[in-house]
Amino acid sequence: MVEPKMSQPLSSSVGDYLKAVWGLAGPGVAAPKYLSSRLSVSSASVSEMLRRLQELGLVEYERYRGASLTEEGRAEALRLVRRHRLIETFLLEHLGYPWEEVHEEAERLEHAVSDNFTERVAQLLGHPDRDPHGAPIPGADGTLAREDSRPLSGASVGDRVRILRVGREDTPALTHLQDRGLVPGRVLRVEEVRGLDGVVTVEDEDGVSHALGGVLAASVLVRGL
Ligand SMILES: [Zn+2]
């Protein structure tokens, strides 16, 4: 990873850190060890960068506890999240990218495009409020809709639910879910929630059963019907 220079305060690396703090903790405190594993960088790099972000007024940083976003940091994180999610939607809807490939490409493109480009994409797409994974797209004014969802892993037997969002962006998980039609919008009935290992078995609208491991079930966010 290229370390940013102070003369380039909002380099792509700064943006990646802000998005990571926001993604891990929202308004809370992101612990350095989670940032380090999320961004695949050493803990020394994390603490150095968090000190810089603090100097830039983008985070509040306490050495062992971690970092939380300032108002300015949060605004910048949401601006990048908006850009990322709009690009993902554009790639899927207009360039024919498969669901599981849009994230990686958006990660690259989001560092290259301007806000003007982002807003033109938003206009072309008709100002969508969700990305292809079902994640809410922050507004141009930095607002983010509240999400009324819960993990499938917390559902009970007999529940009828609709998939609202998939909280994973890695290709194997997305391919697995896509192959089974377990994508946002799909309605499921919970057949079994196994206490032993958290495996959740659901039946889809075509009567086909699918068993999801506990970790995967925790990343599928649903709303009760
Ligand atoms: Zn993404």
Image (tube, rainbow, N blue to C red):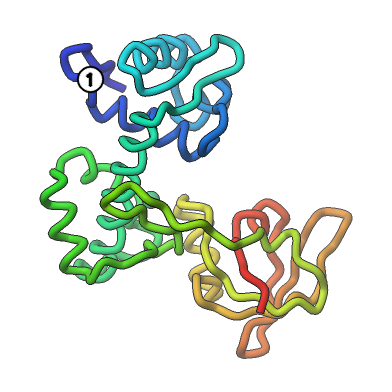
Label 1 neighbour load within 10 Å: few <14, some 14-19, many 20+? some
Out of 175 and 133, give the one closest to the viewer.
133
Q: Residue at x 16, y 46 (%)?
A: 115
Q: Count of labels shown?
A: 1
Q: Residue at x 72, y 59 (%)?
A: 153
Residue position for label 1: 9
Out of 186 and 174, give the one closest to the viewer.
186
Left or right: 219, with 77 as reference point:
right
Q: Secondary structure at mark 1?
A: loop
Left or right: 192, with 32 as reference point:
right
Please determine whether, in this image, residue 34 is positioned above or below residue 77: above
Q: Is residue 105 visible?
A: no
Disc 1, ligand 1: is the CB inside 8 Å? no
Quadrant where the N terminus lies? top left
* Residue 48 on image: x %, y %: 41, 9
* Residue 36 on image: x %, y %: 50, 23
Q: Is residue 183 visible?
A: yes
Q: Residue furthest right?
A: 196
Q: Residue at x 46, y 37 (%)?
A: 22
* Residue 57 on image: x %, y %: 34, 18
Q: Residue at x 51, y 39 (%)?
A: 26
Left or right: 198, with 65 as reference point:
right
Please determine whether, in this image, residue 157 is positioned above or below residue 123: below
Q: Quadrant of residue 3?
A: top left
Out of 191 and 71, give the one closest to the viewer.
71
The residue under label 1 is which amino acid type? Pro
* Residue 95 on image: x %, y %: 20, 67
Please determine whether, in this image, residue 139 is positioned above or below residue 225: above
Quadrant where the C terminus lies? bottom right
Out of 98 and 188, give the one closest to the viewer.
188
